[in-house]
Image (spheres, helix red, strand yellow):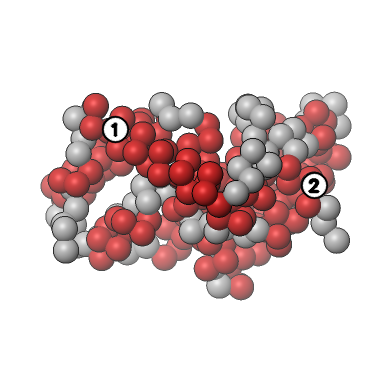
Amino acid sequence: MTNPGIFAQSWPGFLDRLDSDPHMAAEECYNFVLHLLSSWPPTCYRALPDEDKKEFLHELIISLLENQFKKLKSYVDRGLPFSAWLTVVISNKCRDFQRSKYREKSTVLIPSVIDASEYADQLHSKELTPFEKTAYQTLLAAVKTAMAALPEHCRLMLEMAAEETSFADMQKLLGPQWNDTKKIYDDLRYCRKRLKETLANNGVNLNEWFDAT
């Protein structure tokens, strides 16, 4: 049985072995990913058909290990659980996997940085002209830039909220500092407000981009 304490670590031991013992580090990383997916699988991963999960896991592990662990070496320890960062990485990779297999060319999927419950339905169902596609791509680039300016915990919380991660699972992934539902709710609302304000300061009003109906 997986020790839940490993998910609270901000720096799991295998990160220290990426250069000194890459084979051991790769095996420990693989086991960590398996444990995380079995304990708190992101919504995107849960939605995959069983026959696609094995293929996705193979692609995910390759993306983590390739180029001498380039992705893992990009991780910065800011005192938050490594598992929260990895959950975001897995979610992003899963969405890329879904797009490559299932997306219709005329559909643009909204990135997880915007609250899915507020905007995703419109974008999933909207048939886009070439002009509209260019406009949405401009918007998504602005959102990514705004996200990069937010505090680390805001980026993680917004990603997990878009993945429909429950408050209980957020608490487990983020650690004891977020020890009650009200704090998570308040912080998430603050982070969404910060994102919209940052966009507004850059001349982007999200309310102008989506139908009110």
Mark 2 vs 1: CB contact within 8 A: no
Amino acid at the residue labelled 1: Glu
Left or right of 17: which side holds 79?
A: left
Amino acid at the residue labelled 2: Gly
Would you place residue 92 above or below residue 164 in this image? Answer: above
Total number of numbered discs in the rendering: 2
Q: Secondary structure at mark 1?
A: helix
- Residue 189 is situated, as x and y percent measured from the top left of the image, at 40, 44
Task: Decide which of 203, 174 is in the foreground and name it.
Answer: 174
Quadrant of the rendered image containing residue 205: top left
Left or right of 62: which side holds 119?
A: left
Residue position for label 2: 5
Q: Secondary structure at mark 2?
A: helix
Left or right of 193: which side holds 126?
A: left
What's the mark number on residue 96?
none
Residue at image location 36% in from the left, 34% down from the top: 194
- Residue 142 is situated, as x and y percent measured from the top left of the image, at 29, 34
Residue at image location 63% in from the left, 31% down from the top: 75
In the rendered image, the quadrant that contains the N terminus is bottom right
Task: Decide which of 117, 133 is in the foreground and name it.
Answer: 117
In the rendered image, the quadrant that contains the C terminus is bottom left
Residue position for label 1: 197
